[in-house]
């Protein structure tokens, strides 16, 4: 019996062996790991491109390459990080690996569709990355592909846009799969309000994926149609309206911020009660706030467009909605902190990364309120201040939550522990490096440093150099973290190394192919540490 239980998804099972067993698998755990391995490669490439930008910006004037090359580098950096890492990110990796186990299911509702979604992800990423090597050079529009420039530039925009379109299909299918899985495959007795909060966050995210992603897909096809067929959607010379592109793009892309951040919030909500050994404070408030974020997030897109010439009525309405969408996020932060109050806290690497997330996310959120305010946004719009805010939310939020999830579920994934001391050192480099890299951008942004500029005035030199040094520390932290996790030399992991209370900690590490030999029956609420 023990040998049967120990037989895990990491072993060769089914018709094929070796790499073919992975490429043809319908096991949600293997698919989650395949997403993770692909994203780690894309992430490393994106980080190196970011370091190239920081190297060029270390001093005023041209250092290593010209402005056109710089435009291509920051465009592909954005495309890689947004479309192949951050948007699929936590949902694709840990949603696939952990969510079916957490709700007591054997797999997702549509296992073959799940594998197809991964292939679409790889295909879309390959097409987008091919834009660097085909046609008339890398696209130079930035990851937003703003019209009318994206319809007029002679660089290879079509491949990048079509790659993003294919990646959108992967996102839609994954969201559809998760919605059906959560509705139909929960364990007996697991009502919605007995479900762990990470699946709750994935549920809210999935609705955004299904409802909002088709809008950006159509918008990207319109860009291709305008370039190839000269249809005047966005180009004023053809009778189009470039502001229409901005509206269509941000109607998806602001809800997409919540596709990125909601799973991150779900991860933090799992980690904090586990390491505080306390029941989550305000369980229903956290669950419903995820749905509230998903709903209100649809109505705030135009806060990216205050300087585009909208009416004053539209501007103050979108400003008000922007402040309102911060309320459910604040509820989560309040409940996380309250959950820790008087808890029996164990400061392990996952908890450290979770604390780092809260600190960085709060800075990102508070500076977002200043960007949502009409008066201040006029002054800092399109400056380095926006770069800092964006990265504090996306890298400081999603990135640190991803690292937290990786350290949290790593023992369950591989059946091995990792070196805590090395993980803590890596966290120190990552946290200090991140703040040195991006906090100076707030300062020089207020001083007037424009974003996406290849060169700058001498008064911004100190801030850019501090950022360059921070980028080096951040890179060292990433290398140390990956080296520690990739070594796989740790002790054999127990089934429940952290003392967690959700279902994934009740099965062997790593899990069996079918997760459960008998489906669990749920009789109480989650997060019971008594």
Image (cartoon, rainbow, N blue to C red):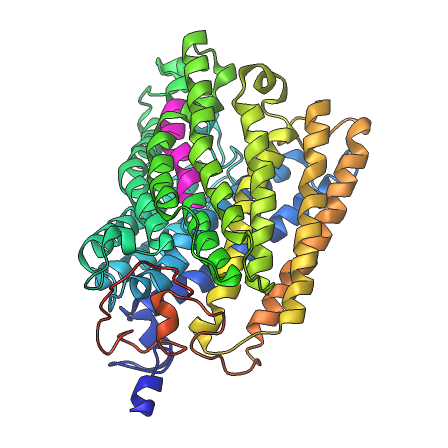
Please identify the quarter of the rendering in which residue 524 is found. bottom left
Q: Residue at x 54, y 16 (%)?
A: 374
Q: How many marks?
A: 0
Q: Residue furthest top?
A: 312
- On the picture, is 291 further left or further right than 64? left
Q: Position of residue 498 (x, y in %)?
A: 49, 69
Q: Residue at x 58, y 76 (%)?
A: 487
Q: Main secondary structure of the magenta part?
A: helix
- On the picture, is 373 further left or further right than 116? right
Q: Is 427 one of the magenta-colored residues? A: no
Q: Position of residue 335 (x, y in %)?
A: 47, 45
Looking at the image, which is closer to me, 399 or 346?
A: 346
From the image, which quarter does the C terminus lie in? bottom left
Q: Position of residue 96 (x, y in %)?
A: 34, 61
From the image, which quarter does the N terminus lie in? bottom left
- Can residue 441 be seen in this snapshot? yes
Q: What segment carries the magenta color?
A: 245-260
Residue 282 vs 521, above or below: the answer is: above
Residue 490 vs 65, above or below: the answer is: below
Q: Residue at x 24, y 69 (%)?
A: 106
Q: Residue at x 47, y 20 (%)?
A: 305
Q: Is 250 one of the magenta-colored residues? A: yes
Residue 468 vs 22, above or below: the answer is: above
- Can residue 148 be seen in this snapshot? no
């Amino acid at each position: 019996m023990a040998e049967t239980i120990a037989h895990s998804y990491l072993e060769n099972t089914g018709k094929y062996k070796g790499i073919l067993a992975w490429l043809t698998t319908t096991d949600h755990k293997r698919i989650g790991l395949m997403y993770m391995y692909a994203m780690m490669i894309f992430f490393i490439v994106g980080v190196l491109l970011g370091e190239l930008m920081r190297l060029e910006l270390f001093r005023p004037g041209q250092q290593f390459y010209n402005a056109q090359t710089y435009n291509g580098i920051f465009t592909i950096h954005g495309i890689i990080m947004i479309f192949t890492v951050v948007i699929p990110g936590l949902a694709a990796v840990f949603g696939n690996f952990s969510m079916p186990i957490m709700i007591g299911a054997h797999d997702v509702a549509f296992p073959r569709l799940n594998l197809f979604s991964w292939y679409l992800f790889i295909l879309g990423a390959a097409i987008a990355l091919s834009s660097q090597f085909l046609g008339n050079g890398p696209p130079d529009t930035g990851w937003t592909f703003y019209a009318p420039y994206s319809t007029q530039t002679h660089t290879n925009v079509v491949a990048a846009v079509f790659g993003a379109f294919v990646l959108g299909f992967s996102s839609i299918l994954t969201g559809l799969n998760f919605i059906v899985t959560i509705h139909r495959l929960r364990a007996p007795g697991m009502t919605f309000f007995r479900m762990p909060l990470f699946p709750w966050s994935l549920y809210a995210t999935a609705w955004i994926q299904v409802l909002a992603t088709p809008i950006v897909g159509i918008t990207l096809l319109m860009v291709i149609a305008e370039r190839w067929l000269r249809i005047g959607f966005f180009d004023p010379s053809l009778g189009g309206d470039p502001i229409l592109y901005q509206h269509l793009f941000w109607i998806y892309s602001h809800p997409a911020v919540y596709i990125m951040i909601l799973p991150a919030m779900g991860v933090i909500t799992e980690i904090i009660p586990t390491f505080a050994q306390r029941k989550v404070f305000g369980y229903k408030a956290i669950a419903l706030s995820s749905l509230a974020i998903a709903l209100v997030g649809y109505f705030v897109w135009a806060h990216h467009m205050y300087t585009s010439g909208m009416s004053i009525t539209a501007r103050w309405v979108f400003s008000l909605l922007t402040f309102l969408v911060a309320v459910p996020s604040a509820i989560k932060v309040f409940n996380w902190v309250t959950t820790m109050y008087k808890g029996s806290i164990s400061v392990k690497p996952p908890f450290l990364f979770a604390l780092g997330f809260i600190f960085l996310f709060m800075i990102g959120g508070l500076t977002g309120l200043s960007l949502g305010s009409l008066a201040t946004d006029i002054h800092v719009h399109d400056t380095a201040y926006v770069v800092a805010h964006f990265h504090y939310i996306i890298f400081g939020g999603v990135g640190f939550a991803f690292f937290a999830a990786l350290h949290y579920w790593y023992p369950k994934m591989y059946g091995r522990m990792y070196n805590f001391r090395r993980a803590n050192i890596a966290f120190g480099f990552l946290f200090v490096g991140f703040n040195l890299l991006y906090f100076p951008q707030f300062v020089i942004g207020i001083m007037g440093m424009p974003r996406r500029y290849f060169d700058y005035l001498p008064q911004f030199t100190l801030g850019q150099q501090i950022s360059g040094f921070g980028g080096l520390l951040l890179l060292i932290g990433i290398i140390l973290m990956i080296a520690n996790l990739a070594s796989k030399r740790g002790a054999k992991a127990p089934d429940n190394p952290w003392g967690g209370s959700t279902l994934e900690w009740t099965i062997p590490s790593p899990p069996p192919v079918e997760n459960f030999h008998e489906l669990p029956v749920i009789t109480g609420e989650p997060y019971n540490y008594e």
